[in-house]
Image: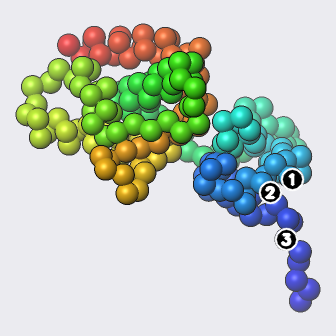
Amino acid sequence: MEEKKVAPYGAVIIKLLKDAVYHDRDKDIWDRLLLYKTSIEEYFEKIGVNLNLNESDGFAYLSQSRNIEDDGLDDEKVPKLTRAMPLSYDVTLLCVLLRERLYHCETNEGDSSRIVITLDEIRELLAPFFKERLNEEKQLKKFDSIINQVKEFGFLRELKGHDPASFKIERIIKARVPADKLQEIKEKLKGKNDSKD
């Protein structure tokens, strides 16, 4: 049987289907993505998927097209590439706080290419929003659980070998929490928090 030739951007397609691609940790894939950008976009367009490439911030990810026209099939009959994962109040809150931190660094500091935040700093950001009468140990466990969820979504990356424990805020968070939507999201969070009281 004749062996079929794999496209030179095949590895990029597979990586994007699994996860986002980052300039700083997927160097070979990133370079190939830029080299074959048009072919990759055309490949994904055929299946109703968008390539979202942010060269200045160094990340790329896929999203599902809203209007899919494929031989008369409507949106309801076309399988979704990814499952919608609604964020909980706590996770959304931390994402907003991290996004604000990133925005502040970008607008007020010279080098914002690597935004690093310590575990203690993240806990301090969260603390004012949790008035529950939990003992300190339970509170820290709750905060760490929120942080782990944000890591799973790919918005934080733990930096190995750092003391104190530190994380990089991944710039892909800008796609999920745009700067112009920060205030709107904060107002919604405030409304949800008020309704808890």
Residue at the spot of label 1 = 36
Type of the residue with mark 2? Arg
- Image quadrant of residue 84? top right
Question: Taking the image as drawn, is residue 93 in sight?
Answer: yes
Residue 79 x/y as whole percent: 67, 47
Q: How does the figure colour the protein chain or chains? A: rainbow
Residue at the spot of label 2 = 32
Q: Secondary structure at mark 1?
A: loop
Q: Residue at x 53, y 18 (%)?
A: 108
Say few, some or many: other residues with alpha carbon within 10 Å of mark 3 (under 14 / 14 to 19 / 20 or more).
Answer: few
Residue 32 x/y as whole percent: 80, 56
Q: Residue furthest bottom?
A: 1
Given residues 43 and 96, the one toward you in this image is: 96
Q: Secondary structure at mark 3?
A: loop
Q: Residue at x 41, y 24 (%)?
A: 97
Residue at the spot of label 3 = 6
Given residues 69 and 95, the one toward you in this image is: 95
Q: Residue at x 73, y 53 (%)?
A: 30
Residue 155 x/y as whole percent: 49, 40
| Marks 3 and 1, how far apart at CA | 14 Å
Say few, some or many: other residues with alpha carbon within 10 Å of mark 1 (under 14 / 14 to 19 / 20 or more).
Answer: few
Camera-near label (2 vs 3) is 2
